[in-house]
Amino acid sequence: MNDRNEFESKDLDFLKSTKRPNLPPSDKMVKFGLEMLSHSSIGIELLDFIREKNIKIKVITGTEERAFEPDNENVVIMLKTVNPANPSRFVLLLVSGVRELMQQEDGIEKPGYVGQRDDILEKFRVSTGDKVGYMCAVAYEINEILTFSNYHITEELKKMGYKKDWDTFLQAI
């Protein structure tokens, strides 16, 4: 019985560990993302907004990858703790988060949870479509630059579930 308890306690030591996979430092990820955006005309529009409004960009870890704006001054990019986003996905999440913040100034209403169901769904559709359009435009422009061709940003956009949107975007240009 004693041997069994020793075996179990050794096997379960990993549960006590608080060590997480290392993410690159947040400031380096943000700097890289902003640098990539500076090579796109749409990205420059986003950068101008960030500078004019003094937007802060924070990277956190969580259970899913997403970007959101908790208030009018911050964009939060959440990366998975395990297997975090590659650089291209990070840039696309950055675009999504910044554009979400810009939408308020551009008159695109943020979908809420109060009101008629059809109205809420329509606001969500418009808001999401706008963000995806920006993501497609930035991906397209960055993909055209030979220096960034190894990042496969358009492929990453498709992996994020936007293949149909990407195809529609290509047909429209």
Image (cartoon, rainbow, N blue to C red):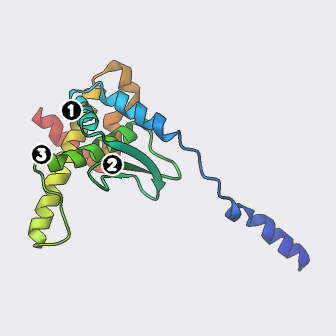
Rendering quarter of residue 88: top left
Rendering coords of residue 47 (x, y %): 27, 33
Rendering coords of residue 34 (x, y %): 35, 32
Q: Earlier in the sequence, mark 1 or mark 3?
A: 1
Residue 113 to residue 157: above or below: below
| Numbered disc in front, either 2 or 3 | 2
- Report the side of 146 relative to 117 (left or right): right
Q: Distance between the residues labelled 1 and 2?
A: 17 Å
Q: Distance between the residues labelled 2 and 3?
A: 17 Å
Q: Is mark 2 on a helix, strand or loop?
A: strand
Rendering coords of residue 33 (x, y %): 38, 34
Q: How far apart are marks 1 and 3 (CA)?
A: 13 Å
Residue tagged by mark 1? 45
Residue tagged by mark 2? 74
The residue that appears at 28% across and 34% down in the rendered structure is: 51
Mark drawn on residue 106: 3
The C terminus sits in image quarter? top left
Check whether the beta carbons of the residues at disc 1 and disc 3 lie within 8 A of each other. no
| Numbered disc in front, either 1 or 2 | 2
Q: Is mark 1 on a helix, strand or loop?
A: helix
Residue 61 to residue 143: above or below: below
Name which residue type carries label 3. Answer: Asp
The 10 Å Cα crowd at callout 2, few under 14, some 14 to 19, many 20 or more, is: some
Check whether the beta carbons of the residues at disc 2 and disc 3 lie within 8 A of each other. no
The residue that appears at 17% across and 35% down in the rendered structure is: 170
The 10 Å Cα crowd at callout 1, few under 14, some 14 to 19, many 20 or more, is: few
Rendering coords of residue 147 (x, y %): 37, 20
Name which residue type carries label 1. Answer: Glu
Rendering quarter of residue 109: bottom left
The residue that appears at 30% across and 26% down in the rendered structure is: 38
Name which residue type carries label 2. Answer: Asn
